[in-house]
Image (spheres, grey):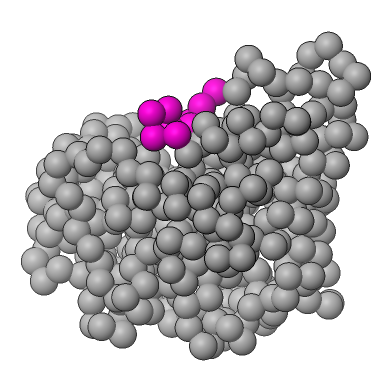
Amino acid sequence: MSTEVLPVGIKCSLACKYCYQDPMRAQNNYSPRAYSVDAMIESIDKLGGQFTLFGGEPLLTPIEDLHRLWAHGLEKYGKNGVQTSLSYWKPEFYEMFRKYKVDVGVSLDGPHDLNSPRCDTAQTSEIHSRFVTLIKEGYPVSLITTLHVHNSVDGKLDKLCSWFNMLGSMGLKWARIHLLEVDTKYAQNLALSEDEAFNAVVRISELENGICFDMFTDMIKLLMGRTQDTSCIWNSCDPLTTPAVQGIMSDGSMSNCGRVNKDGINWLKSESPLPRQHERLLALYNTPEEFNGCKGCRFFFACKGECPGQSKDWRERTDHCGLLKRLFSYTENRLLAQGKQPISLRDDVNDFNLMMANPNHHGDHYDFKSIEATVGRDSVADV
């Protein structure tokens, strides 16, 4: 579970042309009218763990309130986090990141025109300079890059891969590749074809630059049955309660992950814990693929229909199903070449699919360690 605190709601200093939060902005649903740092801290402590400031652009938070939130996080939980575009900046942020031990997640789609769906080249240059400074000076930095036609086709993909190699040589250790969430007509114009997306993801996965891209490490873990440390998109998220993401709004109220707010409403969290929710998981397991379900798919135990925010209707499997099947098949071959047998190629794979959909034994965090098998080897090395 991650805790995301949104002091300024989804207010942002950019206007990214593919942002999944735009349906909420269209309804003028930016954040609650009330604002209380005390209420936010109280909710943080009720959840009882490290938190990340999120947005919109969380660095728009009044700087004295950033000090209060991060001072509390450091004192009580030992560190802090922020997910930012670096588009709104004050020089004192460098010192604050150090002082309060802030892990800095940066959203950036590449240098120059590769980042054009997010902002113009002049602003990208400023953002990139700050990002590089953070890496070179040893701040704990991670990266999220969304793939689209402006950074992942033809020569642009070459530039993107060269950029990743440069960042790796500077010391960047962790990055996440996002598949574009298509919620608007403009985002449709940015979307890659399945072949383009497959080519881009495979090219990036084969880079040897010291950066861990979690999409690829996740797929390896999932196919080998090790689900504990994988991203929330693979863990059968319930779109009505989004247990993987606990949002805290500016008035201290709880909210769900914003990726499922397709109708522009930021639904509040239930005040009491709900029983485990399986509606989407069960529906996908039982619905044939021709009706946008997952019935019979040998990758169901690993993918589980992926993120409900990646489908136009959360009851359906991800819009990226075809691409993910190809990527899982590609990862299978890589594992086989290493002498490992993915669960997806076992004769009893349907037993594992059924385990995922069994309400009496919810399998999204099942440890398959005891049933791992090898091809031509006595044991399986850690992936």
Based on the picture, tell me whether residue 364 belongs to the magenta stretch.
yes
Q: Measured from the top left, where is residue 69 in percent x and y?
A: 23, 48
Q: Quadrant of the N terminus?
A: top left
Secondary structure predominantly adopted by residues drawn in magenta: loop
Q: Measured from the top left, where is residue 233 in percent x and y?
A: 51, 50
Q: Measured from the top left, where is residue 150 in percent x and y?
A: 68, 80
Magenta segment boundaries in residue numbering: 358-367
Classify residue 18 as left or right of residue 253: right
Classify residue 251 as left or right of residue 123: left
* 20 to 237, vertically: above or below: below
Determine the residue positioned at 61% across, 41% down: 302
Determine the residue positioned at 81% across, 21% down: 374
Q: Quadrant of the C terminus?
A: top right
Would residue 205 be visible to someone looking at this image?
A: yes
Q: Nearer the viewer, residue 51 or 64?
A: 51
Would residue 2 be visible to someone looking at this image?
A: no
Q: Measured from the top left, where is residue 278 in percent x and y?
A: 38, 44
Q: Nearer the viewer, residue 275 or 330?
A: 275
Q: Quadrant of residue 314?
A: bottom left
Q: Nearer the viewer, residue 152 or 296?
A: 296
Q: Quadrant of residue 320?
A: bottom right
Based on the picture, tell me whether residue 175 belongs to the magenta stretch.
no
